[in-house]
Amino acid sequence: MLRVVSVIGDSETKDPEELKFAEKLGEELAKRGYVILTGGRGGIMEAVCRGAKKMNGLTIAILPSTTKEEANPYVDVAIPTGLMWARNQIVALGGDIIIAIGGRSGTLSEIAYAWMYNKPIIAVSRFGGWAEKLAGGKIDDRRRDIIYKADSIDRIIKIVENMLKKTINQ
């Protein structure tokens, strides 16, 4: 079975370092055969998809509108939902693991959904936003684990591989 990684983050960031990080993350995830699932628009979502495509990875977008044309040019499978922000629940549910980079209120809602659905969450602690604020912490006491903190792609890959091995062995 294909393993799916949801990558969430700010759709409007212009920070070149953050975008470069997301693109490199997409490359590394695709190299290892992971499918990339995003909200399919710009910013972090576009950068991670662009990186995945460099390695011939598969990218899926859960779009807020009713049209596939909203997807960034690096999306292979565009799924229009017509759900607007409510589509964030699908992005969270669709991934075997969630990686958050930066982010504003939309990213916060995806992190909250992932938490409620008991999805492992990795938050990058380098680019501000909700990912950095929540990295290493908990949203509430309904889970024993934490939102895993990572400040490098190597650390993210280690956590992803360890977490996904655990879910395969359960």
Image (cartoon, rainbow, N blue to C red):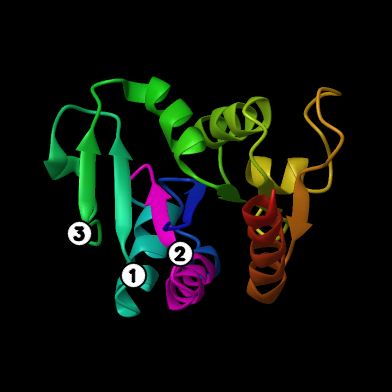
Residue 74 x/y as whole percent: 25, 62
Q: Is residue 32 visible?
A: yes
| Vertical position of residue 23 compared to residue 160: above or below | below
82 sits to left or right of 8 = left
Q: Are marks 2 and 1 in contact (CB under 8 Å)?
A: yes
Residue 13 falls within the magenta-colored stretch: no
Residue 37 falls within the magenta-colored stretch: yes
Packing grade of label 2 (10 A; few <14, some 14-19, many >=20) is many
- Kind of residue sitting beneath label 1: Gly
Which element type, helix, strand or loop, lies under badge 2? loop
| Vertical position of residue 38 compared to residue 26: above or below | above
Please tell me which residue is depicted at 48% across the width and 72% down the height of the picture.
20
* Extent of the magenta region: 20-40
136 sits to left or right of 26 = right
- Kind of residue sitting beneath label 3: Pro
Which element type, helix, strand or loop, lies under badge 1? loop
Q: Which residue is mark 2?
A: 34
Task: Name, please, the residue furthest toward the front.
Answer: 169
- Kind of residue sitting beneath label 2: Tyr
Packing grade of label 1 (10 A; few <14, some 14-19, many >=20) is many
Sooner in the amino-acid sequence: mark 1 or mark 3: 1
Question: For the N terminus, which image quadrant?
Answer: bottom left
Residue 71 x/y as whole percent: 22, 47
Which element type, helix, strand or loop, lies under badge 3? loop
Q: Are marks 1 and 3 in contact (CB under 8 Å)?
A: no
Q: Which mark is residue 57?
A: 1
Q: Which residue is mark 3?
A: 73
